[in-house]
Image: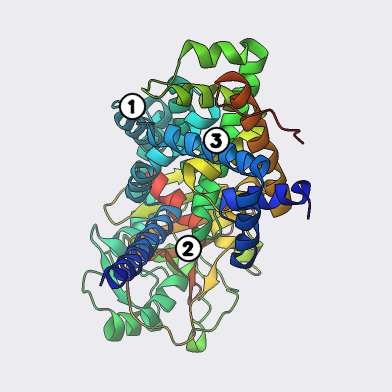
Amino acid sequence: MAAYYACYQGVFSCYLKRVDFMIDELLVKKAVNGDAAAFLKLSKQYQQPLYRTAMGMLGNEHDAADAVQDAFLKAYRDIGKLRDPRQFRSWLYRILINRCIDILRQRRRTTPVERVWLSDPVENNIESRVDISQAVAELDEQHRAVVVLRFFQDMKIDDIALVLNCPVGTVKSRLYRALKKLKLLLTKDSGLGGEPVDLC
Amino acid sequence: MTCADFSGLIMDLVLGELPPDRREMVENHLEHCERCRREYQLLKQVTTGLRNWSDGIEVPALMEKRLEKALRSEIKPPLKRILPYLAAAALTLVLAVGLWGEAGMTTFLDGKKAVVKEDALEKLAVNPPDVPRQKTKEAAGSNMVNDEIKSAPRPPEAEKFLEQAAPMAPPPAGGKEQEYAGEIKTKGLRAAVRRAAVISLAEITPDKVRQIEIKDNNERSYTLQDNRRELISMMLEGISEAVPAAENEAGEHIITHVINIQLTDGTSCILNYDLENNAVFFNGKLIYPGAGFARAVAELQH
């Protein structure tokens, strides 16, 4: 009975996902044809995942909010150029990641990265979360993007490759390196324990 | 296999990318190798930590409003951005009432939605409705769904002007694609339109366009000139991406806009546009332009 229920739940959630996907596609088609209301709906739908991604990339609320807003404005201006509505999600994430990378580069020219992350710490009750956010800040922008898309958005490696416009193999190797580096930083800094392992 | 060989497989296991047949092998190794097991546990802690961090991120309360405000201001441009356009629109309205209206464009729409069947549109696309031609009358008699499409009374000078106009090219048979080779003379334009050797949409490039006059079914007129080059380009890009309707496609279309593209050489072509379906009737042909066309028209109305 439990197995049957689990199976039913799985099928039902797949069905819901499919319906969501179809609604998304319809909204995107409308937005591509100049329907501003459809784009507003899409912006509401994608606001939270995009904000999370931007937070992972930038580490502070103010910059993350700016990046999301800029990404949506650019997407609105350029949506007419989107050839395949099914690519909307990866296209939108690509715009956001590029905007975040721009902000990171600007920041590098003006403010030390550590200061930005530390001046606006992540509010939480879990000590390790602060450690992880700081460790992520140590990654370069390409590795950071892969990690954030994978663990903040649960994206498959193929989808990440589509967003970042690079081969699947490159995504995999960046992910491996990033995780190893994070593991090293965390074992060193936050006392997770374990001996540092030879990396990369 | 050595521990170094298992390193990549452990990473795949952590990422959930390991095929089932290899999963068992790696799990067996983890049971017996403390060093690899420790590595696996640490990597798991890293990924769990990342997911926990992500789950704890909340969108700031004011962000949704801020974003919506920014998008709405992008959708509806501020007054100062549309002032030149308003001035141009006002000027066009004056000209349109005085000139273009006489040429039948206002009577074509008459301030309301004109419902016309496709075969009537074939003729309308080629002939402005006030041109006194037998074919147009036939079309109006047999095909117009809506009686709102009527000829306007013309002053004597307009009649004289129209008499001088050469007859229009006949509409295409069977709705097939054709190039329009004829003469358009309407009083709606400042300068008389010269006979065009061939007017084909494919030949129109932004540099050839002098201006585009657009009249909608709320009797609003817009003129796109050098000040709105980006919209002209957007419209032409949409036209260049147009796909033709299926040969057997049928149905009613509501014309919402009449678009007069005037070229630098004095020629022009008139498109009848159904905004709802993003469909254009031109030269007896129904086409669906690219999204840029609809966006440009929608942008005008904002």
Q: On what subunit does the disc labeled 3 rest?
A: B
Q: Quadrant of the N terminus of chain B?
A: bottom right
Which residue carries the number 3 mark? B46
Indicate the position of residue B192 as horizontal and vertical percent values.
52, 56
Q: Which mark is residue B60?
A: 1
Left or right, residue B132 beside residue A55: left
At horizontal 50% and vertical 53% (from top left) the residue drawn is A88
Q: Are marks 2 and 3 on the same chain?
A: yes
Give residue B156's quadrant in the image: bottom left
- Relative to the observer, which residue lies in front, B238 or A113? A113
Extreme residue in the left direction: B147
In the picture shown, does residue B62 fall above or below B123?
Answer: above
Mark 1: few/some/many CA within 10 Å (<14, 14-19, 20+): few
Task: Find the distance from the CA under tag 2 to the CA under tag 1.
Answer: 50 Å
* Disc nearest the viewer among 2 and 1: 1
Residue behind mark 2: B270
Evaluate whether label 1 is on the same chain as label 3: yes
Label 2, secondary structure: give it: strand
Query: Which residue type does callout 3 highlight?
Result: Val
Q: Residue at x 45, y 45 (%)?
A: B223
Would you say the residues marked 2 and 1 are in contact, meaning their CB atoms lie under 8 Å apart?
Answer: no
Q: Residues within 10 Å of mark 2 (few under 14, many from 20)?
A: many
Q: Is residue A30 visible?
A: yes
* Res. B235 mark: none
Label 1 marks a residue whose chain is B
Can residue B208 be seen from the camera position used here?
Answer: no
Instruction: Looking at the picture, tell me which residue is in the foreground, B55 or B185.
Output: B55
The structure residue drawn at horizontal position 47% and vertical position 53%, both measured from the top left corner, is B189
